[in-house]
Each structure stands twice: as C-alpha cells, then as structure tokens.
Image: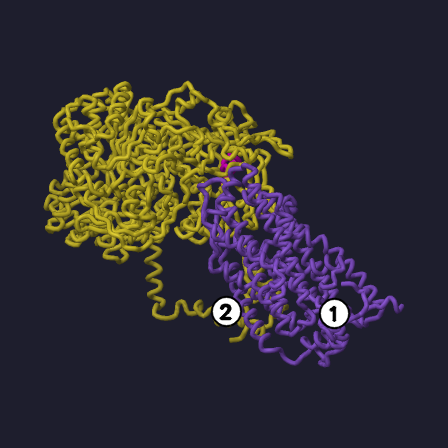
Chain colours: A yellow, B purple
Amino acid sequence: MPTPTEAHQVDMTAIRRRLRERLEAGNGKSYWRSLDELADSDDFRTFLNSEFPSEAETLVGSVDRRRFLQLMGASLALAGVSACTRQPVEKILPYVKAPEEIVPGEPLFFASAYPLAGAAQGVLVESHTGRPTKIEGNPDHPGSLGSSNALAQASILDLYDPDRSQIITRAGEIRTWENFSAELRKVADSHKESKGEGLHILSRSVCSPTLLAEIEQVLNDMPKAAWTVYEPAGHDHEREGVKLAFGDYRRVHYDFSKAKVVLSLESDFLSAGPGSVRYTRDFSAARRVESSHDEMNRLYVVEALPSNTGAMADHRLALKSSHLPVFIQSLAAELGLPVASRSALPTHARWISALARDLRANAGASIVLAGETQDPAVHAACLAINEMLGNLGKTVLFADPTPAPQGSQSKNLAALVSAMKAGSVQTLVILGGNPVYDTPADLGFAEALAKVSFSLHLSLYNNETSELCLWHVPEAHYLEAWGDALAYDGSVSVVQPLIAPLYDSKSSLELLALINDRVGMSGYDLVRDHWRKRYSGPDFESFWKQSIHDGIIDSAAVGISTKAAAPPIPGQRWAAELSKAASKGASGAGRGLELIFRADPHVGDGSFANNGWLQETPKPITKLTWDNAALISPATAESLGLENEDVITLSVDTQSVNAPVWIVPGQAKDTVAVHLGYGRSRAGKIGNGLGFNAYKLRSNDAMWTRTELKLGETGEKYPLACTQHHHSMEGRELVRSATLFEYRDNPGFATGDDHGLDPEASMFPDHPYEGYAWGMTIDLAACTGCNACSVACQAENNIAVVGKEEVAKGREMSWIRIDRYFEGDIDEPSVLHQPVNCQHCERAPCELVCPVNATVHSDEGINEMVYNRCVGTRYCSNNCPYKVRRFNFFLYSDFDTEVSKLQRNPDVTIRSRGVMEKCSYCVQRINLKRIEAKREDRSIRDGELQTACQAACPAQAISFGDINDPESKVAKLKANERNYALLGELGVKPRTTYLAGLKNPNPELAAEDGGSSRAAGGHS
Amino acid sequence: MDKHSAPGPQEPNAMIGPGHSFNSVTDKISSIVLREGAPRGWWIGFGIGFVLTNMMLVSLIYLFARGTGIWGVNIPVGWGFAIINFVWWIGIGHAGTLISAILLLLRQEWRTSINRFAEAMTLFAVACAGIFPVIHTGRPWLAYWLFPYPNTMGLWPNFRSPLIWDVFAVSTYASVSLLFWYVGLIPDMATLRDRTVKIIPKRIYGVLSLGWRGSVRHWHRYETAYLLLAGLSTPLVVSVHTIVSFDFAVSITPGWHATIFPPYFVAGAVFAGFAMVLTIAIPLRRVYELQDFVTAQHLDYMARVMLATGLIVGYGYLTEAFMAWYSANPYETFMMSNRMTGPYAPVYWLLITCNILSIQALWFEKVRATPIGLFIVAMFVNVGMWLERFIIVATSLHRDFLPSSWAMYAGTVWDWSLFIGTLGFFVSLLFLFIRFLPMISIFEMKTMVPEAEVREDLL
C-alpha cells in the first residue's frame, strides 16, 4: 500500500488551480478535510480506497442495485408512516414554591410518592436538567410533612442501578414488548373463555387505587380468576387484628401528637412502616421541651430485639416475643378488660400496674400499639385497650381499608401454592416481588412454580423468581411510571414520573391494562381516567393539575375517608384468641430458645439488597453493614459460650441455616433474632452472596416467631463489617442526658465543668465573623437514630460506596454517622444515639496541620475542604478529635458506569483517589440560597436554607442557620440551657453543638428501673 | 587521647592497632576498593539487597497503581508504616552527622575510623526515609506541592503545618549531609585515583577528586571547608528530629501532644543511629579484618553513647507516663493505660524490653568488650526504636477522643514488603559504597599512626 507521504506528493499549484475551479463552480459553502481531498486527485482516491476499503466495498456483495433500491424505498416509506403517529401529550407539572423564580440551570422539584409495602410516602424529587437526583420529603403530604427516611432517600439509587433488569425475556431469551404482549393477550383471551379458570395474580401489597381497579376488573371479567397478595414483611397481622376486633377490615393509624403515653409492643413505629416518618415527627414534637417547664410524652416499649423505638423508650422491657401476648393479657386484666385472668408475669407486676395507672391517667391521650411481629390477637387487644381508654377517634384513627383480598395472607398464599402444585394454575402473573426467594421455605413455592405453564414476572430486577418464570418483564421504577398511591392514613397521592423509562420497562398498571384489553393505554391515561371517574366536583382539569402539583389528592373531593369512625369492639372474640396466643407463649414451647424474624432495617425483605447506600449504612443498634447475623443477648451468648462472628447452625424442625453470631446488649434472653433480606443469589453485583437467607427458616404458619430452635456450633468464624466496635463512652461526657426531673432540678446539667478548662482560652485572636456564621444543633432528645440523615447526605454529596472489605478496615465514607453507645446494665442497657458530622470548629485542628492549605476556614465559619488542592497526607484526620474526615484510600467513586452518573448531584465534586473529604454543611445549598438572596438584595432568611441531613430528619432534630442572627432558630437553640459542645473542653469551638438528651421516666418506676433513669453526663 | 604524651608502646585503649605506618593504612583501606573482583560475601550481601530493592520497587509500583488503600491505614489510624518507617530511618540517619560534626568539633578523635561509613549510612538512611513522606500521600504525584515554588495557582504551602517544616528540615539535612560526606571524600578519592591502574576508574575517581593534588593550599582550604560544614551540620543534628517530633507534638492527639517530644526524639535518634553504626561496624570490621582501625575502644565508646542516649529515651518514656497521670487529662490518662494494658500492650512491653532493659547490659564492661554481645544489644535497639514509633503512631490514633471511632491497625503485606524493601535498598547502597569508596577515611586514619605524632618538643 502506498503511504500518502511517499506515494503522493501534493502538487500545490495543481491544488490551487483546482481549488479555484471548484470554488467558482460550486455554490454555497464547501468543506474539505485535507489538501488531498481538496485536490480531488486520483492518487487521493486510490489512497482513500486502500485506507478505508470498507467504504469502497459497502455496496459490493450480495445486495445488488435493484435490491438496494427496494430496501431504501421501503424504509423511506415506513419512516414516513412512523412519523404520522403523534406522541401523546402527558403533562407533568413542576412543584415550584415560587414560580417566578425559576431559572434554567437551577434544580426543579416535582411532587411524587414513594410506594412501599402498601403505603406511600410523599416526596419531592429534585431534578437537574431532566435527571432526578435527590429525594426530599413533600411538606404537603401527611406522611412526610417535608421529611423522609433512609429508604425513600435511597430509592433514587435503585432507579439508576446498572443491575436493573433492562430487557424482556422469555425462557431466558431476549424478546420485545410486542412479542410479549401478543402472547399475553392470547393467554388472556383463552382465560376469558373459561371465566378466568386457572388464572392467578400474585402481587405485593397494592397501594394504588388505579391498580386495584384494574385488578378488580380482571376479577369481574373473569370471576374464576384469583388474586393473592404476599408481602413478606407487611401488615397482615395488623390487618387481621383489626378484623378480629371489629369484624371488618379498616386501616388504622395514629396521631402521636396528641398522645401523652405510648405503649409499643414490638412496634418499631419510629423507624419502620409507612407512617414512621409522620409518627416520628409527631412523637418528637410531643416530646420536645424548650425549657424545664415543658412536658414530655412518655414511651413504654416491650420488645425482644432492641429497636430504635426501644432506644427512645423511657421504660423498656426486654421480653421474648412469645411472651408478649401474656404481657398484654395481664395489662388488659389490670385495666379491667374481660380477659382470661392470667397472673401477670411475676417480675413485671409492678411495671404493669404502674403502666396501667399511667395509661388510665392519660385516657384519651394515649396509644397502645403492637408490631407486625405480634399475633393478630395482640393487635386486637391493643385496639380494645385503646377503646377502653377512649383513644379511638382521638389518637387512634381509622381509614378505608387497604385494598387486599379477603382472608389472611398466609392462608391465601398456602392456597395458591397448593393450587399450583395441583396443576390447577395455568397462568400466574406475578406483579413485583420475589416469591421464589421470600416465601417461607416450607411452602415450596419454587417447585410449585415449575408446574405453572405460563408464568410471568414483572420485576425491577431479573431475580430469583424471574429466573424460574417463563416471561420476565422489567418493571418501571416509580420515578419512571405514572401511578397513584395511598399513604399510611389512606390519603392519596399521584406518583408522578420524573424521567422516561431508562429501559424497556412497564408498570404493573400497564401490564394489567393489557390483560383488560386496554391496549395502547398509557399509565398516564389509566391514572387520569381513574380519578376523573372518581372526582365528583367541577373542573377536573384544574383539580388534576393541583393534585399532581401538590403531590396529594384532596381526599374529600374523591370520596376517601382518612378519619372514619369505628364501631364498638365486641369483647369475646379477641379475648378468646388472645387466651390462645398467651397460653402458647406461656407453655413449654415458650420456654426454650426462640427464633424471631425481623425485616432488615435497610434492605427490608430483600427488595433493596442491591442498594449500596442501604447496604453500607450501619444498621441501627448493631452497626453492622453488608450482612445479617444471628443476633443474641449477652446472657445467651455467655451461657452458650458464643462470641461475635462464631458461625452457628440454626435449626427448627427440618429447616436449618448457618449464621454468624452477633451479640446485642438489651436483647431478650433465649432469643435469636435474624433479619430477612440476605442470602440473595440474583440480587445483582452488590447484593449477591451477602449474609444468609433467613427465609429458609421461616414457616408459613409462624412467620415471625419460631420456638424450639436448636443451635449447633460449626467451629468456623465469619467476619462481619461493623462500624463501631466500642460500645461504652469510657466515662467521657460525650452523650449527655438526664431525666426530666433531673433537668428540672438542674437545668444546666448539660454544660458540665469541661474538666475545669476554659474552652474559650486561646493565645490567638478568634476569626471575626461579620456576615453569616453558619451553625448547627442536633437535639439528642429527638434523634431516633434512624439513619435518614446519613443516607440523605450520601445522596446529596455524591458519597461513594466502598464495600464490605473496606468498611471492615474502617474506611467507610459517611459524612454524618450515628454513634451509638450503650450505658448501664448489659442486659438492659440504655441506647444513646449521637449523629456526628464535621463540627466545623472555629479553631479547627485540621486546618493548622494541612501542609498545602487544602482545608481552610471560610469567613462564615465553615471548614472548607478543597479537594483539588489535597495531596492526601491524612494529617488533618489524625488531628481531628471527632474523626469525621473520610479518605479515598482507593478510587472509590465510580467514574465509569454511565447510568450511575445520572444520579450525581452536579453541584458537588466527585472525589477521586487520594483525597480527604468530609461534611461541608452542604455548602452548595448555602451558595444556591446566597445567590437567590443576593439577586433579591436581601440576606438569606432563617429557615429558607436546609442542609440535606436536616431536611431529611423526620424528628426535626437538626437545626441549621446563621448563628450571627440572634432571631434564628439555631441561635435560640444554642442559647438553650441543654446546648453543649461535644469535646468542648478541647477549645476547638465546634459550630455543631448538641442539645442534651432527655428521658421522661415514670416516677413510680424510676427508682427501680435504673436503666432508663441515669445521671447526667453518663459517668460510668 | 593525649597527643602530646611521649611515644611509647601501644596502649590497650588505642584508636589504631599496633605496627601501622602511613603506607600500611593506605594499603589496607584502598585495597578493599581496588582489588580485583569482590569477595563472595559481598556478592551474597549485595544480591540480597538487590532482590529486596526490587521488592521495594514492586511495592511502590503497586502503590502508585492502586492507592494508599493497599496499606493497613484507615480512619482513625491515618498514618501507619509509612510514617513509622520515615521516623525510624531519619533517626538512624542521625549518628552519621553527629559523629562527623559534633564529635569533630569536640575533637573526639576516635570518630576518625567510623565517621566515613557512619556518614554514608546517614545518607542512605535519609534516602530511605525520604521515600516515605512522598509516597505516604494519597496523591504522590502532587507531593511537590509541599515545596514553596512560584506557580500559576498563586498558592503557597501552609507554613503553619509541621509537615512543611519537615520538608525543609529533611531536605536541608539531606543536602548538608551529602556535601559533608563528599567533601570528606575528596582527598581519599585522589588517593584512589593515584593508586588505581585501570583507566576508567582512574577517570571517575579523577573527576570526583576535583583535581586534588594534596598541596598545602588544598589542605588549608579543605580543613576550613570541613570545619565550616561541621559547624553548619551541628544544629541540624538537633533540628531535624526536633522538627520530625513536631509532626506529633503540634497536634492535639493524646499521646502526641507533649512538650517532651523534641529532646526525647533527638536522644532516640542518636540512640538508634549508634545502634545502626554498631550493627554495621561489627560485621564489617570482622569480614574485612579492620580490627586495627575499628578497635575495641571504638566499640566501647559507641556502646557508652548508646547507653547514655538510651537512658534519656527511658526518661522520655517515664515523663510521658508521668505527665499523662499528672495532667489529670482523661484522654491522656486513658492513652497511657491503653498503651500499657490495651490491645497493643505486648508491643509496648516489647519496646520497653528492647530499648530500656536490653541496654542495661551495657553497664558491664565485659558486654561492651564482646562484639557479638554488643551486636545483639544493637539489634534489640534497632527493633525497639521501630516499635517505639509504632507505639507512638498507632496507639495514639487508634483510640483517641470518641470511642465510637476506635479501631485497630495492622500493617498489610504491602506495608511489610515496602519496609523490608527499603531495608534492602539501604543494604544495597551500603554494599556499593563499601565496594567503590574507601569505607574508612584514609587520610584521617593516617593522623592516628604514631608517625603522625607531632613532637612539639622537637620543634
């Protein structure tokens, strides 16, 4: 091949001549790539052909000219046809607080709702140029009031999960939506002829009224078709409990703002469940004291496994799960309800009578509630006690029932599986979920599924169930598809998509519309039509616009009741059921080792197993990441000779599984607790192979508690990644707290003596702060340790996930972590939470030691980290007394995965390898507001600016603002007598300060119940 | 030694063996360099060093490719082996300059036979030390930002940071040590130039000897320059480790924040330096049969210095413990009790055994007179001083103010490979030095032979 240099010498005069000729001949602009091309010489053509032979040969070969013209003609004609279909208009409306301030380039917020386990939480989704990047709470939504939780925060990551299912498959092979819909419609038509014989729909809890209507239509059209709901960690017991009490289903929810005394029986209402965000808000509001004259509510918790709610309790009793029916029976008896008179558990008689007196004294202003892990009879008993106390309609409220099939979930599921095994299910439509993985192992769902000839799984991931189904269809994420959803209290939101589906994915609605012959109806049409039918008022258009703008539908306008009255509770049925449950717990079965199941606080039932943020966020109380474990109490560990990370075999009946031990102070003796959601094999790159599968121990008859557990030792060890190895404060006054009485006696208890040192003393002058001076307070009396702040921070600040091995080495990246200390007796300790972020010291030890000035002090008091300047000496971290600095030991941030890039906050730098990072007080948010304020020639208003952690916090524990403004909320809180600086005696003058924790023990019990009434300062 | 005493039979504490003349000294020392081929022992020693140097290079390449995370460092223990090794090597690098400069100024003539290789050792130790501050950073390719150079970013380093002081202290020390060593080598280089018969070495030594002809004017200039350099290096001996100790003392971390650190670190450095000089001198004098030049008296003196500085270091340990208690600072108190009884307690007590208990043997003349005994004690001290830095760095950081952040620290395989690799690098350089340069100063040794004695009574 002649190379251009040797074979072809450019003849410049010839080129100039030809150029002139061409320019004169041509009209318009003509572009040329090189002098050779310009010269258009033969040599150049030879060169071009030899260099790019493909170009010369494109049209040579099997396609002849005639065929080519045919093809071209056809494609041109068809292209023209496709252009005829007009894209339907689906208007979405931005949620704008002040519409006149919209500026391109600034984020927009849209209201939507995050549906989870049968109830939705209202959210505002931050959108940067069409990419949803961050979830915030929706202030207008009753389930949110502007706050959110860790799961909602992390849901944005699922949207961009590269492991999400992206294609439709049939028996593992790629198919198109058209292939699929044709086959499904054929199957549906054949079922219609037989009135739905052999057609089953299996779904998760449905919280969408439109979807429910679609399902109902299927069932109306095909009366022999069946619908089953299975939620591995849902609210079935609560639902059945309500039915047991009232004889019919209804949705129960609580108003904690009016409750002065709360008793929770294993209900982790502050952390888990659809209402938890609102409950936490109301609960902490009823607990907030601004001066020593204020009143606090009082929380009693009885539970087997310590929860965040238990940690907030003023009195906590650790009882085995199976003993709780006895407990509530005793309480009911003490309150004079007609229950079988069983003597109270001997050691707790005083506790129960004091509790009963407290409840009676607060009749009409108290709540007794039970968790899903308790028997329906316990739920019914709680309702009966509430009724007796006159709480119904005041603190305990009712709404329209959650749409679900009649009967208990366990029975329905068992019926479905036996029908499948019998071969009478030809078609199984599985909407979401993962029943192959998360149904109790004793049912044998997977084997039964093999007998179904047409199985279809709609799912976000191609998971364990998809693998065994004939068809798999990728499910649209809630931010990709239209929908609607009921909140915890029965109010309805429109789920507004923020982005077109990233892949060829569909929503449950669209799938069912296909079965219902509504081919071509989009999710938008379906939802809108549904509400148009239900709306009775005038001008549907503006009602609709308002509803999607606000993110909440006016319940009254569509005939939904969120505060329905309840009929009286007949006394016999629940009492009889309770007797049965209580005698089971008190019998021999309740005496041995007991296995209790819990939904994992972060990965839930396993749905979020592939969410790196949730995997890496330390679980409340245990501070474990990336794994589940067999949790046992210290006493049990001692008697069995077990240590942390020992692998044991848990076996019940014929089921068994190996699990590593983790000792949890405060857990009830003789219980082993396991979290669901681990041991996944097809979760994705992140979630595969983590932990063990606790479903293998579950039984359909005993979903939450199994007795007669046997333990076997294996002699092996399994490393667990825990972020906090040390539980004691070592006598240091880190978390300061007191009881309400102590506070009243000594309002200044929190300030302490700082070891006789003057924190103000310094040889150097202080920085002057003339403009803003940003500061933060964190109220330890309100913090429940729920991790919402931590995940919100991760989402806002593009914080990388590092993986289990790195966490185990102590290299987690969280900018705000929640420290957890135990105090008091190891069997009944108090649990203290303390969120710690960068304290933005006014005399920051880190700034002084950085050799390259990469961490500097702003004139507003923020300790600023300059990533570009950092060379990574890590000296700043060594000199940080709070150890809040995080280092990129490796290249932790993902710079490669395209879809993950969409999630990133464009206002925050993505950190590369070898640089230090830490909390910035969300300086990007400050600057956004500063620009807004400057443009309006004013200063930033108090409350206008929220950091990500503050915005997320459902307990409103975090306040942030300008401490130079004496009228700001944060300045007032800093003036509060409970305000103290963590490690203030070091003289670093932290800008983040804490409001000391408070507990409100019952004076009757305080004397004996040492665990909850501790002295100020936490001296141990 | 009294120069003015009458010549007599060789005293038992003489600084040179009996029967040496100017010629025999030159012959003996230069022959080590000028002989044909190297002894088998040299090849084995250098071979081991060379292999380990390559291990160091592999560790460095892997470090640059992957990041600091290959080491055991974490949060809270942000500094680990890299800083421990840095301080350890810098400490070892102290003996050379101390011997050359301070002992010269104090007219301690026994320094003569050991100063050359002590200086070489200093340089090589500083070279090993110098690797670490650069590579311990997260982004070593930007470590030059620690130097104040004019740049388009308009940025200066932070002069308040002890790490910047370190940059100046260590680079100054390295350059002055190099200069001092080289200036001292010039007359000997000329000797080698004159003695070698091969053309290439002759040219090389010729260039390096800078045209030295041994004229009186040369000697005069040389003596002045050498004395000036000695004066210049003397404060450096104290300053370098003082400033290295500031890396710790200026911080607020319990266990680091202590005013005893500068003197305690300097003493520790001299202690470690003499231990390393002994570690090298004892085998060397045996292998090359230099007992006449490095005499029992030398070993005895070095052992005494080691004992004295070791006791200062012991005093430092006591002061740390006392201040932790006396300050009533709960964090300091806890730090000390954690060192003594916490998870790293075995390391702490091993350190006390190595650095305090083992040197008590040096009180006995018999031990000081037994090279093998001295060698064992010196090895103890080498290990002990490394452990001391481990204790200071790791135990202070791993449990500081907030128990929530407490964690454990241990070196990984890459930490060890790099550390052992630098030992190999050090050994390689040392063997090259022995092979190509006179390890004992020839012209200075000549001043020790009886012929050099100036008989003032005869003038």
Q: Label 1: which residue?
A: B445
What segment carries the magenta color? A918-928
> Where does the image place residue B265, in percent across and percent down from the top left?
62, 51
Asked if residue A19 is among those painted magenta in the image, a careful observer would answer no
- Label 2 and label 1 in one chain: no
> Where does the image place residue A659, in percent across and percent down from the top left?
28, 50
Packing grade of label 1 (10 A; few <14, some 14-19, many >=20) is many
Q: Residue at x 28, y 18 (%)?
A: A361
> Where does the image place residue B154, in percent across and percent down from the top left?
66, 46
Quadrant that contains the C terminus of chain B: bottom right
Figure disc tally: 2
Q: What is the spatial separation of the Cα atoms under label 2 and label 1, in whole angstroms?
A: 79 Å
Looking at the image, is B294 positioned above or below residue A337? below
Amino acid type indicated by mark 1: Met
Q: Label 2: which residue?
A: A48
Q: Residue at x 68, y 52 (%)?
A: B238
Left or right? Give the position of B263 relative to A426: right
Q: Chain of mark 1?
A: B
> Where does the image place residue A695, in percent across and percent down from the top left?
23, 47
The answer to whether residue A186 is visible is no
Left or right? Give the position of A317 relative to B416: left
Q: Chain of mark 2?
A: A
